[in-house]
Amino acid sequence: MKKNIIVIGSGLAGMASAAYLAKEGHRVKVVEKNSTYGGRLQTYKEKGFTFDLGPSWYWMPDLFESFFSDFDRKASDYYTLTRLDPGYRVYFEDKEFFDVPENYKKLKKNLEKIEPGSSDALDEFLSDGKIKYEIAVKKFIYKPSLSPFEYIRLDLIKHLGRLAIFKPISKHIREFFTDKRIIQMLEFPGLLLGAKPSKTPALYSLMNYADIKLGTWYPSGGIRSVATAVQSVAVEQGVEFVYDEPIKKIHKKDRSVFEVISKNRSYEADIVIANADYEHVETNLLDKKYRNYSKAYWNKRTMSPSALLFYIGINKKINIPHHCLFFDTNFNSHVKDIYDDPKWPDNPLFYVSCTSKTDLDVAPSGSEALFVLIPVAPDLTDEPALRNSYLDQVLDRIEQKTGESIRSNVVLTRSYAHKEFISDFNSFKGNAYGLANTLFQTAFLKPKIKNSRLSNLYYTGQLTVPGPGMPPALVSGKIVAKQVMKDNS
Ligand SMILES: Cc1cc2nc3c(=O)[nH]c(=O)nc-3n(C[C@H](O)[C@H](O)[C@H](O)COP(=O)(O)OP(=O)(O)OC[C@H]3O[C@@H](n4cnc5c(N)ncnc54)[C@H](O)[C@@H]3O)c2cc1C
């Protein structure tokens, strides 16, 4: 029977779940608090510059493709992908930098110069990463993870050892490499998953395979194009979108019907899918008796880092590639400031995306659009003076490392951090990308996609399975939609 479904939030996960369910003929409405779709994938335009506000790394193109192919479409129906070469540059403490080129042979040659024997080690490390990637993508990632029994099947158990979920990635990398710079470079992709390398399972060396072998890409029109494409797919399936409607409450009207209440009106639904931050939905939208998890549970979770972001327009061209990692300070002390002793870091690592290197439309002619991300602990507060001091530090270090003077060419700056994540997205503790993928927060140990007290209330997005990132958000939407179909067939 066709159902009335309300999806709360138009992030990638919410829009994907809506698209899958509308394709099955259900009547689906996405109700979004903000004035446009896309969740974390927003843009900011000023003085001829356009910045993607959130994500900048387009990795795992196969997972995006898999979403589109479920609707008989291709990513190229909506945007054109360019593989970045180099994928990124890493600036280290000394004068050097290291490029990760598209050409694998060239990369191996560059590595060999840093650590003899490391090019063969890389082959071995990545062929293991490839196996993990394929097992994870084919066998595990689409599991609803409602119970550990989903994983207790002979064909899956035989793969568990290979995935090395009990070994930290920090240890795994050191079994192959000894040079500090190579280790930092290989630990970086895992940081996007939100936990420090000693707490991230070696399973996630699959991210190194994704990074180096599958490549770093840029969609025409910027990352916002991904949100626009997913929203178009949803609309093409018949999904309706309502904006500027923050949901205030989810009630159970009677045994089978929900009432989803915003400031101005209420919506009736047979099924509700919450894509807004899980903790916000539980704590603010549901009565206590209906919550899956207590406040204490949430306070014990390891959140992904938040981020202090700067959007900087400069009126000159500079000689840097599209993505640059500034690993020119002490990696371990920054990691400690995020996870062990959460505080504003003294000398943080940061990364810069200079999208105008690939996309001429994002900056006026002769100018560059720079996006700077400093990962920081969640739940910190700040005031303008603190942000300014980090901006100063970032500009100094970009100048020092690149040898380009830019300070007097800055024509635009904007910053963004915890406060904005909370006010824009109701994000728990101002997290930027959800819950960290630690061992005890992976698969069936993540917050569940189903409410255990209210049937037909589901959760999707970066605080549940499979985890943070754009491809996982699309996968999360599919997992939930399949569960809804199964429960209501
Ligand atoms: C700074 C930053 C950098 C990142 N970098 C990368 C990257 O390089 N590569 C990558 O793959 N991923 C990256 N990510 C992660 C990726 O963007 C997210 O994991 C993904 O977009 C999350 O999608 P989602 O659907 O789970 O949640 P969201 O995008 O948060 O969507 C949730 C939606 O719910 C809405 N909402 C909240 N409360 C309510 C309410 N009460 N009523 C109605 N609606 C509500 C919100 O407004 C939002 O639209 C980054 C994220 C950030 C913030």
Image (tube, rainbow, N blue to C red):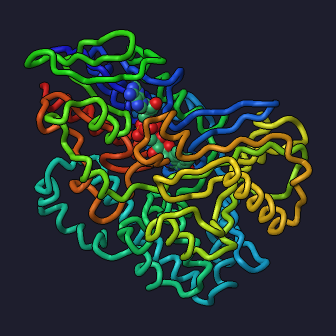
Indicate left or right for 101 with 145 as reference. right
> Would you identify the image quadrant in which residue 276 lies?
top left
| Marker count (numbered) | 0
Q: Where does the C terminus fall, quadrant-wise?
A: top left
The answer to whether residue 368 shows anywhere in this view is yes
Q: Tell me if residue 469 comes above or below residue 118 in the rendering.
A: above
Indicate left or right for 106 with 184 as reference. right
Q: Which residue occupies the extreme top position in the image? A: 265
Q: Which of 284 and 332 is in front in this view?
A: 284
- Residue 274 position, x and y percent, is 31, 31
Q: Which of 456 and 337 is in front in this view?
A: 337
- Residue 381 position, x and y percent, is 54, 51
Which residue is at a point 23% across and 30% down the rendered structure image? 286
Indicate left or right for 452 with 15 as reference. left
> Would you identify the image quadrant in which residue 218 lies?
top right
Which residue is at a point 23% across and 33% down the rendered structure image? 458
Which residue is at a point 49% across and 33% down the rendered structure image? 39
- Residue 212 position, x and y percent, is 56, 63
Q: Which of 230 and 468 is in front in this view?
A: 468
> Would you identify the image quadrant in which residue 407 lies?
bottom right
Q: Tell me if residue 187 comes above or below residue 411 in the rendering.
A: below
Q: Nearer the viewer, residue 272 or 252?
A: 252
- Residue 237 position, x and y percent, is 38, 18
Q: Where does the N terminus fall, quadrant-wise?
A: top left
Q: Tell me if residue 361 comes above or below residue 105 in the rendering.
A: above
The answer to whether residue 61 shows anywhere in this view is no
Q: Tell me if residue 11 comes above or below residue 397 in the rendering.
A: above
Q: Which residue occupies the extreme bottom position in the image? A: 116
Which residue is at a point 46% across and 62% down the rendered structure image? 207
Indicate left or right for 64 with 51 as reference. left
